[in-house]
């Protein structure tokens, strides 16, 4: 039995919902769900709380955990985090480019408005 299945089994044996277990550990129901689906793993503090809650040693709780799975999950989270930071960088550059475009547009608009105003004032523009 792998770690996520073990967590779900232990919770069910105690007759707890994911929400109830999350409350006991200070995490959300969604976090417990991710642990049980193998989408993430508890941090060390939560592992200690889990072992105390289920009255078992850490070794008993995590025995059989595939370290490669944990490493792979951590790597994929790092990659996702890197993608998000890259996207945020592109958004920042796009905002700067948009501001520059607006500034240049305002200058050009003001220039043409000044030309039209000068022509109207001098009477040479819009002659009939």
Image (tube, rainbow, N blue to C red):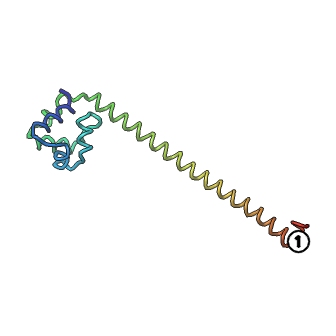
- In the image as oriented, which residue stretches furthest toward the right? 128
Please, which residue is most extreme toward the left here? 55
| 95 relative position to 66: left or right | right
Q: Which residue is drawn at 85% across and 68% down?
A: 119
Residue drawn at (31%, 32%) of the image? 71
Q: Dot 1 lies on which element?
A: loop
Q: Is 43 situated above or below 4?
A: below
Q: Residue at x 41, y 38 (%)?
A: 80
Query: How far from the left and from the top, in percent, is residue 98?
Result: 61, 52
Which residue is at 15% across, 42% downward? 50
Q: In this view, does 91 lie to the left or right of 20?
A: right
Residue 127: image x %, image y %? 90, 67
Q: In the orientation shown, which residue stands out farthest toward the front?
A: 128
Badge 1 crowding class, 10 Å Cα cut-off, few under 14, some 14 to 19, many 20 or more, is few
Q: Nearer the viewer, residue 75 or 99?
A: 99
Q: In which quarter of the image is the C terminus?
A: bottom right
Quadrant holding the N terminus: top left
Residue 124 falls in which quadrant of the image?
Answer: bottom right
Count up the numbered dots. 1
Name above or below for residue 35 compared with residue 121: above
Q: Report which residue position mark 1 lands on.
A: 123
Location of residue 111 (image quadrant):
bottom right
């Amino acid at each position: 039995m792998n770690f996520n299945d073990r967590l779900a089994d232990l919770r069910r044996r105690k007759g707890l919902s994911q929400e109830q277990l999350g409350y006991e550990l200070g995490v959300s129901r969604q976090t417990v769900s991710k642990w049980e689906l193998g989408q993430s793993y508890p941090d060390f503090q939560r592992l200690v709380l889990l072992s105390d809650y289920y009255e078992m040693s850490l070794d008993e709780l995590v025995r059989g955990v595939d370290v490669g799975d944990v490493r792979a999950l951590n790597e994929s989270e790092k990659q996702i985090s890197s993608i998000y930071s890259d996207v945020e960088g592109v958004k920042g550059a796009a905002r700067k480019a948009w501001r520059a475009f607006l500034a240049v547009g305002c200058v050009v608009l003001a220039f043409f408005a000044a030309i039209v105003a000068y022509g109207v004032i001098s009477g040479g523009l819009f002659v009939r």
